[in-house]
Image (cartoon, helix red, strand yellow):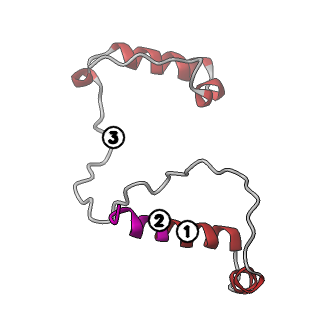
């Protein structure tokens, strides 16, 4: 499988040195079977893998009117109350998607 690296679209590539970029470009030209991966440990046990662990949905700022007691309750729970409100709304949304 051929992979072409687009330097313009990947912002992390701009942080690489010339040598690192050249090495990646050379690897991209090689066939998969030619690349030595012997220093990478095998991972056969995926039982603790978490799907979407690093997924971050796009956030939108909105103005929302909540009952004062509800807002106060979320705030006194500690931590990031907006995150907890968002999680409660997400759980509600997911539990009601099957109803439609």
Which labelled disc corresponds to residue 93?
2
For label 3, count other residues whose C-alpha is less than 10 Å away and answer few (under 14), some (14-19) or many (20+).
Answer: few
Is disc 3 placed on a helix, strand or loop? loop
**The residue stretch that appears in magenta:** 92-100
> What residue would you read off at disc 1?
89
Labels 1 & 2 near each other (Cβ < 8 A): yes
Which residue is drawn at the image coordinates 46% and 15% (left, top)? 25
Taking the magenta stretch, the answer to whether it contains residue 95 is: yes
Earlier sequence position, callout 2 versus callout 3: 3
CA distance separating discs 3 and 1 = 44 Å
For label 2, count other residues whose C-alpha is less than 10 Å away and answer few (under 14), some (14-19) or many (20+).
Answer: few
CA distance separating discs 1 and 2 = 6 Å
Q: Residue furthest front?
A: 100
| Residue 80 can be seen, yes or no | no
Is disc 1 placed on a helix, strand or loop? helix
Which residue is drawn at the image coordinates 60% and 47% (left, top)? 58
> What residue would you read off at disc 3?
39
Which residue is drawn at the image coordinates 62% and 23% (left, top)? 17
> x, y (%) of residue 50?
37, 60
């Amino acid at each position: 499988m051929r992979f072409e690296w687009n330097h313009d679209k990947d912002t992390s590539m701009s942080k690489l040195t010339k040598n690192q970029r050249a090495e990646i470009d050379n690897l991209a030209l090689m066939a998969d079977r030619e690349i030595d991966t012997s220093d990478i440990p095998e991972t056969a046990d995926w039982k603790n893998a978490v799907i979407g662990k690093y997924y971050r949905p796009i956030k939108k700022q909105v103005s929302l009117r909540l009952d004062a007691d509800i807002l106060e309750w979320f705030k006194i729970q500690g931590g990031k109350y907006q995150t907890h409100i968002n999680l409660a709304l997400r759980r509600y949304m997911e539990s009601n998607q099957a109803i439609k």
